[in-house]
Image: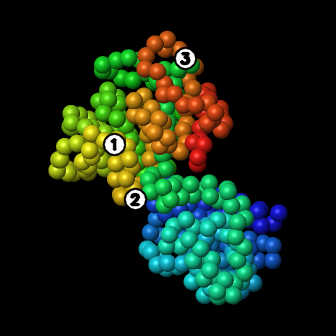
Amino acid sequence: MEEEKYMRRCIELAQNGTCNASPNPTVGAVIVCDGRIIGEGYHVRCGEAHAEVNAIRSVKDCSLLKRSTIYVSLEPCSHYGKTPPCADLIIEKQIPRIVVGCQDPFPEVAGRGIRKLRDAGREVVVGVLEQECRQLIRKFITQNVLHRPYITLKWAESADGFIDTIRTGGSPYRLSSPLTSMLVHKRRAECDAIMVGRRTALLDNPSLTVRDWKGRNPLRVVLDRRLSLPSSLHLFDGTVPTLVFTEQKHPDKTNVAYCTVDYSKDILPQVMDALYQRCIQSLLIEGGRELLQSVIHAGLWDEAFIEECPALLHTGVPAPDIEKRYQKGAERWFDRTVRHYIHPTR
């Protein structure tokens, strides 16, 4: 189908903004005239031009716009944010036909862009590859509908089901290979924040930065109830912003902020609300078994990636339990298998 072909191209383009568009959604746009693509664009970075603007700017002969169709993976915005409304620009350029992948879940848009275009006499088609387009902006939807970040779990486990040896110090057992470590850093670059628990921070002393992939470093988040973690840890080196959740009040330091939560109650909803208030759209959890299992038990996760290492540890820290019926697939990456799980309500 012709419309689906061009919408798939919109989705391909949108994925180029995965690392930089947040907290805005990733969006792609294609302009077609007489069966030929004359313009393309995607939302490159938050605060910069939207996909529709970039696509229109890429058209060399603007006179063609008056008889073209613009395909957009997400409903054109109708409100003033950091940039003017894209719906207004489409009307101004006299583009007669607009094909939209899915409606915007953002309350300030939510159908208003489509209505504005139709009120201006434009033909608007909605719902082409809708599910694929919604999947593309699943993090944005979670943030706006559930009022929390989109949560991805990640761990590596041995062939006999352990994530580490039992230890009181020293380096963790390396279950990921140098090549699969790149995948981990790619996931970090695609998330706004990354979280670990106190024990993981203390024993592993992780940097939680993007080193084996090109991209921005996520906000580092650590749970430290009594502020017992030493200041010498990489998390507190000031090179990357770090957020500490604690029950004690503490003044912020250079690139280290403290958020007080009530540890006598379930802290996970409090943590998620605090991250939502900070416009954190996506969270990668790389913690130890205790943190990962608590998130799984709470049903407070959206997808998980589990790397299978061929090594046998025989004993150690058991891998978190996650129901196999949630597994949606598995891929072979280099010498490892990575299982992919999706929460059943997502």
Direction right: furthest residue: 1
| Residue 299: image location, x then y, percent | 49, 41
| Residue 75: image location, x then y, percent | 61, 71
Q: Residue at x 51, y 27 (%)?
A: 321
Say which element carries label 1: helix
Say which element carries label 3: loop
| Residue 94: image location, x then y, percent | 67, 87
Q: Nearer the viewer, residue 127 or 238?
A: 127
Residue 112 location, quadrant: bottom right
Give me the disc on residue 279.
2
How far apart are labels 3 and 1 at the CA level? 32 Å
Q: Nearer the viewer, residue 238 or 243?
A: 243
Do the residues under discs 3 and 2 have CB atoms within 8 angstroms? no
How far apart are labels 3 and 2 at the CA level? 39 Å
The residue under label 3 is which amino acid type? Answer: Asp
User: Could you classify mark 2 by the number of other residues whose Cα lies within 10 Å: few (under 14), some (14-19), or many (20 or more)?
Assistant: some
Give me the disc on residue 267.
1
